[in-house]
Amino acid sequence: MEKLSHYRQIVQALLLERSKVKLAHGDVETEVVFDKERDHYQIVHVGWDRGQFIYGCAIHIDIKNGKIWLQWNSTEDDLAAELVAAGVPKKDIVLGLQSPDLRQYTDYAVG
């Protein structure tokens, strides 16, 4: 349970830090969504830019079976490397956004 609490804190801190970065244009809000009971964590952008409605998930991270799953990352940041720098071992990080067939060729967990 201690590891799970630690991973939750790391993921939440990572997303809260990312949420401070505002989009360069438009009236777009950055929302941080934490489902702490089910361990789903997201950053979502919602608003208007140049007459178009903007909605999209920028980052989606889950914690499943004691591992941090990077489900989606539309930023240029290497979130897996940042998790490692925060103390998460590579064996506990799954690149869920990558094909299961290709995960075996990474330095991270396969699932």
Image (tube, rainbow, N blue to C red):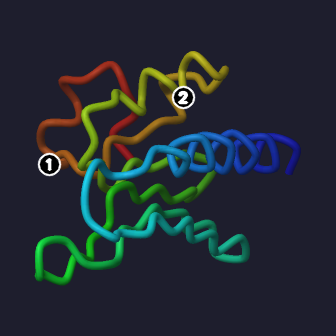
Query: Which of the 4 quarters of the picture holds residue 105?
Result: top left
Above-or-below relation of 52 to 36: below
Give x and y (percent) for residue 109.
40, 34
Question: In what element is the residue under mark 2?
Answer: helix
Mark 2 nearby-residue class (10 Å; few <14, some 14–19, many ≥20)? some
Q: Quadrant of residue 37?
A: bottom right
Q: Residue at x 62, y 66 (%)?
A: 39
Image depth: mark 2 or mark 1 in front: 2
Instruction: Give me the residue at 47% from left, 55% from top.
Output: 61
Query: Height in image: 9 above or below 42?
Result: above
Q: Which residue is mark 2?
A: 83
The residue nearer to you, when weighing 98 against 47, is 47
Q: Position of residue 29 (x, y in %)?
A: 43, 69
Q: Image height check: is 39 above or below 9? A: below
Q: Which mark is residue 76?
A: none
Q: Residue furthest right?
A: 2
The residue lying at 33 percent from left, 19 percent from top is 107
Mark 2 and mark 1 lie on one chain; the one further toward the N terminus is 2
Relative to 16, is 48 on the left or the right?
left
Q: Residue at left 12%, top 73%?
A: 50
Task: Give the labeled residue for mark 1.
Answer: 99
Image coordinates for residue 51, horizontal then vertical, percent: 11, 82
Three-letter amino acid code of the residue under disc 1: Ser
Report, in whole angstroms, how far the alpha carbon at label 2 lies from the one at label 1.
20 Å
| Residue 7 falls left or right of residue 18 | right
The total number of labels drawn is 2
